[in-house]
Image: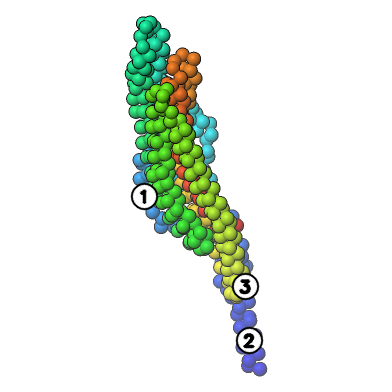
Amino acid sequence: MKKYCLIFLCLVFFVLFPFILSDNSNGVVYCDDEMSYSEIEEVIQESVNSQLGDLDFSDFEELLNQLGDDEKQFFGSASIIDKINQIISGEFANNQQSIWSAILNLIFDDVLSFLPLISVVIAISVTFSLVSSTKPTGKTKSLGDVIHFVCYGTIIIILVTCTVSMINLTSNTIQSIKAQMDISFPILLTVMTAIGGMVSVGVYQPAVAVLSGTITNIFTAVLMPIFIFRLVFSIISNLSNNVKLEKFASFFSSAFKWIIGSVFTIFSAFLAIQGIIAGSVDGISFRTAKYAIKNTIPLLGSYISDGLNLIVASSVLIKNSVGACGLLLLFATIIVPVVKLVVFMFSLKLASAILEPITDSRITNFISMLAKSISLLIVIIIGCAFMYLLVCGMIMLSANFF
């Protein structure tokens, strides 16, 4: 009999325990098992602020400070933390009109900066055409070759000097993208580990290492020399009609396309397949853990499960906000050099089209081949940036669990 009484008292205690802990200041006993929207928002905000305080964004801030005024204008904020908070709070608004206006201003400024260069090239080519057409009769063909060599050499010096600056601009941009990878990916993977996406972290960690190490080295140590070789053979092949090296330039162009195409295809295919599988495994693991907590812990299991949801939601919010901030910084980093290279390329194409009916075909062929070579630099920057965007986007889509 005492045994049954003890069991009855225990049951009564567990039934009345939530009511004892509830607010009874008004003499009414109740149990509020659901949090209001404002309370949930407050809890998530506190968790977000706590986790943001534990993350180190000093290297991110240093990268942002190294950007020029034009790049900072595209980023839209003077601080990484401010931009992340804007994205988290929903106050961030992408003003497309101001971005397009800034791009148009950037294009206009680049056109004005390249206009004197192209004007000088056109003037030299027209002068060469006039001198060649008015040379004294009876002179040998060597005089025309000398005139061509002088004018061609002058054009080479002018355009190659500008091209060298474009090469340096591309190299600096690739190094900046690599630095962003080395800073942003550890933060994203750390937050993903805190969420519980261990399988996804195991997949993305080697992919990130390959991207920031091997692939960027391929871009700088293999593709850049290929561009230089193509440029050199383009110059030599137009020195004289007797020198035929256009096939070498075509070979280097083909090698460039095959290398970058193979790297991108293999890397993106591996990342997509492994990322999808890893995200599915992590999602199943998280839901299994929630179910176990909710059904194995008496009374408090549902509360712990809901609290886990709030913590994970704040971590997911931070992960995606940091990823979005990194992509905005990437866009601000590449937009200026890409626009400059595109304007330079089209300026060369325009100059080649203007000079084609006027001057020697060797000069127009060189300018046209140089324009095609500049397009390779654009591909290098966009290809590296796109693979960074692909990895960052996959991380943002993984381990969301909602």
Tag 1: amino acid: Ser
Q: Residue at x 60, y 75 (%)?
A: 296
First reached walking from the N terminus: tag 2 or tag 1: 2
Q: Can residue 8 be seen in this view?
A: yes
Judged from the image, the secondary structure of the residue bearing numbered disc 3 is helix
In depth, the one of 192 and 246 nearer the eye is: 246
In depth, the one of 361 and 240 nearer the eye is: 240
Q: Which residue is drawn at 63% across and 77% down?
A: 15
Seen in the image, is 14 located left or right of residue 349?
right
First reached walking from the N terminus: tag 1 or tag 3: 1
Q: Distance between the residues labelled 2 and 1?
A: 59 Å
Mark 2 and 1 residues: CB-CB less than 8 Å, in contact?
no
Q: Which residue is the site of mark 2? A: 7
Dot 1: few (<14), some (14–19), or many (≥20) neighbours within 10 Å? few
Q: How many marks?
A: 3
Q: Distance between the residues labelled 1 and 3?
A: 43 Å
Q: Where, quadrant-wise, is the C terminus in this rendering?
A: bottom right
Q: Residue at x 65, y 90 (%)?
A: 4
Query: In front of the other: label 1 or label 3?
Result: 1
Q: Which residue is the site of mark 1? A: 58
Q: Can residue 177 be seen in this view?
A: no
Q: Which residue is the site of mark 3? A: 295
Q: Where is residue 335 in the image (x, y as percent from the top left)?
A: 46, 35
Q: Which mark is residue 173?
A: none
Tag 3: amino acid: Asn
Q: Where is residue 95 in the image (x, y as percent from the top left)?
A: 52, 35
Query: Is 164 located above or below residue 40 in the figure?
Result: above
